[in-house]
Image: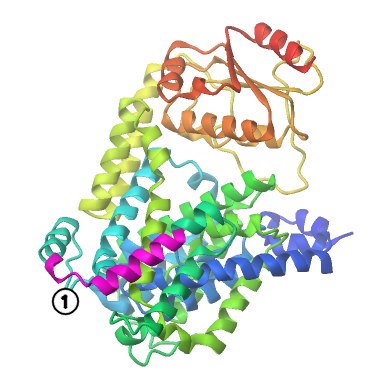
Amino acid sequence: MSLASRTETSPWALFVPKLVTVLGEGYGPKEFRHDFIAGLTVAIVALPLAMALAIASGATPDKGIITAVVAGFLISALGGSRFQIGGPTGAFVVVVFNVIAKHGYDGLVLATLMAGLMLIAAGLFRVGTFIKYMPQPVITGFTAGIAVIIASSQIKDFFGLAVENVPAEFFPKLEVLGLALPSLHLGTLGVGAGALAVILLLRRYRPSWPGFLIAVVLASVAVWLFQISTDTIGSRFVGLEPSFALPAFPEVSFARITELFPSAFTIAFLAGVESLLSALVADSMTGRRHRSNCELVAQGVANCASALVGGLPATGAIARTATNIRSGAKSPIAGILHAVFLLAFMLVAWPLTAYIPLAALAAVLVVVAWNMSEIDRFRNLMKAPFGDRMVLLITFGLTVVVDLTVAIEVGVMLAAVLFMHRMSEAVEVQAHLKLIDEDVSDDAPRGDVDPFGEHELPPGVVASFINGPFFFGVAMRLGEVLDRTGPVSKVFILSLRDVPLVDGSGASAILTLLERCHRNGTQVIISGVQAQPKKVLTDMGMFDDPHVMVVADFDTALAKSRELVA
């Protein structure tokens, strides 16, 4: 019996790291070569990001790389996803900066340790099953708000403004930066603008090249060659030497724990949500399935370890995970190698970081902020029903103006109230879908049921039926439909005849499905759309896609599918 089959029979099978599963399936030199190249590629992408995010968080750049090495290694080694890449991310910048400003760096260490323990407990109690069902307007609202805060925090270094103390609050910060505009340093602005131009041009014409690293290297060479007077890592952080030595353990008392609890909870919440979103993205790109609760436990262990070496909070990074997959990764060993490569850089080439201009790292973070903003998704959700738009805008506004913790709490509460209101309007509808989808093992049978058993589907045609309100609680399951169909189909029929209402998250899930079918060359036929879903989907532009056909009922859809296949 193989190692993989033995672990699947254990009650703890869903907590077995994917690394163990992969090694049990068989791992050889061919897979290692793919993982080696992918790990090196991701390390090249992660290097400037880790330093830039650490500086934006109010820490020193070495803390970012230490976090990427320690947490990145453990997330890949112990996690429930084959492709997850862990490390510091933009989502933590706001909360980390605030914790350091209010409670000092030892306060951050204790908050990160507490967050790690919360994540471990959440995984063991299988809370990961529920975290996956976060409403999209809340997620988009707070990530877009974080993006605005990150971008505004880089104005000083990008323009070289002479400001000693920049307020943490958004509007006072803009006021202080506006008053400091006359001190703009042209040399610094030139370095920042040049680095930003390089990143954007490479993304446009050479998207496979490591634009962040190339821009930072070219900016560093330009500053050294032309003796441009601008702040660098070496000038701002004089004599900085990275170290994995254990810091002095912070003071632990009931009062201190109570004081840091809201920040620790926010860190744990962000780590849990972002890591599982990243794992879902990896699943959609590869057709694999992650173990959500195993992933939460790994995130918790990684954050505890990062805190013990003085690092920052860490989670799964969506962009780096996607890069890992596109680079040909086959297993978690790619993520482990990415941490090893970053460690090698720290040991061998760390003195070179002294020449990196802060304006170039600011340019990197401006692009990161733009990517985080998900402006297309934000714009699309602004066409959703009124309630979803309000949740989106309130969460966004509270994140920017008040506090991230408050924004998440209020956003989730409003989404829950909105959901209850919508369900009360559709109380006569009985949904046969299982709303909470438990983790399943890799070898578990799919248990597919064809709701169209009375119809004979032509070869190459797949049909799916949604029964009941299609809201954020079940929207995440729609992506699994294509995973269950096996080979790519020619025609996909989606019946909405028993869907009385659709919210913004449900519409976004349908849009994601349509985009995936479009990439696969699959014609989509939507049948039996009721009035409310039809209005929402029309307003959000779902029916403008030439690959989507809307018909009155399933019989018509079946007839059309036969014509298309023939």
Q: Quadrant of residue 20?
A: bottom right
Quickly name the residue at label 1: 164
Q: Secondary structure at mark 1?
A: loop
Query: Disc 1 marks which amino acid?
Result: Glu
Residues drawn in magenta: 180-199
Residue 366 spot, x, y in % from top left: 36, 59
The reply, left or right, for residue 33 in relation to residue 423 is right
Please indicate whether residue 527 sits to the left or right of residue 168 in the image. right
Q: Residue furthest front?
A: 226
Which of the pair 449/6 is nearer the observer?
Answer: 449
> In this view of the protein, which residue sits in the foreground, 160 or 497?
160
Q: Position of residue 553 (x, y in %)?
A: 61, 7
The furthest residue to the right: 1
Residue extending farthest left: 179
Residue 267 shows in this picture:
no
Magenta segment includes 188: yes
- Callout 1: 10 Å neighbours few (<14), some, many (20+)? few
Q: Nearer the viewer, residue 554 or 430?
A: 554
Residue at the spot 50% in from the left edge and 44% down from the top edge: 130
Q: Which image quadrant for residue 152?
A: bottom left
Q: Does any portion of residue 258 appear in the rendered image?
A: yes
Of 225 and 112, the residue lying toward us = 225
Could you tell me which residue is drawn at 27 percent across and 74 percent down? 187
- In which quadrant is the N terminus drawn? bottom right
**Can you say which quadrant of the picture contains the C terminus?**
top right
Tell me which residue sits at (59%, 39%) in the image.
Answer: 437
